[in-house]
């Protein structure tokens, strides 16, 4: 969540400075360049805690320690598998493991 807050903040600053640049008649290209540079400088200088929290959340997500994100399709598939196993006790579903390659 910290990543999305920081991204929204930076994007908001970019939009605000871009509109001010257009109002000052800098042109679209110069307004965009100035907006990106100023947004980066402002967030770098004044929002250190938010930036650190965003980078920590990204590091946690890509470290392999975070819980996997599951889509609604995966959740419904898992529920169907659990129901099938509950109905038929001899049935075993192990979709979490990768199949072992067969030696021919």
Image (cartoon, rainbow, N blue to C red):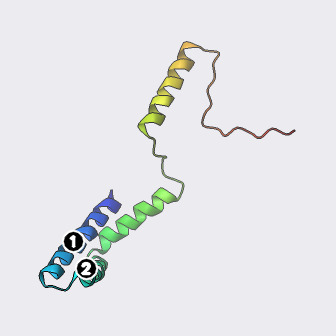
Q: State if disc 1 and disc 2 touch (CB < 8 Å).
A: yes
Give the crowd class for mark 1: few <14, some 14-19, many >=20 residues within 10 Å. Answer: some
Residue 104: image location, x then y, percent: 87, 38
* Residue 31, picture quadrant: bottom left
Residue 50: image location, x then y, percent: 30, 68
* Residue 25, picture quadrant: bottom left
Element type at mark 1? helix
Residue 35: give its label.
2
* Residue 96, picture quadrant: top right
Q: Disc 2 to disc 1, how far (Cα)?
A: 7 Å
Residue 89: image location, x then y, percent: 60, 15
Of the 4 image quadrants, the one containing the N terminus is bottom left
Look at the picture and state if 10 lies above or below 29. Answer: above
Residue 7: give its label.
none
Element type at mark 2? helix
Residue 15: give its label.
1
Q: Residue at x 67, y 40 (%)?
A: 98
Q: Which label's residue is closer to the chain start, 2 or 1?
A: 1
């Amino acid at each position: 969540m910290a990543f999305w807050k920081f991204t929204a903040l930076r994007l908001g600053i970019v939009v605000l400075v871009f509109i001010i640049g257009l109002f000052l008649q800098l042109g679209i290209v110069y307004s965009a360049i100035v907006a990106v540079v100023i947004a980066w400088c402002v967030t770098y200088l004044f929002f250190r805690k938010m930036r650190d929290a965003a980078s920590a959340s990204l590091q946690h997500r890509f470290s392999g320690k975070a819980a996997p994100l599951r889509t609604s399709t995966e959740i419904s598939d898992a529920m169907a598998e659990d129901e099938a196993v509950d109905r038929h006790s001899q049935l075993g579903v192990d979709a979490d493991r990768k199949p072992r390659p067969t030696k021919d």
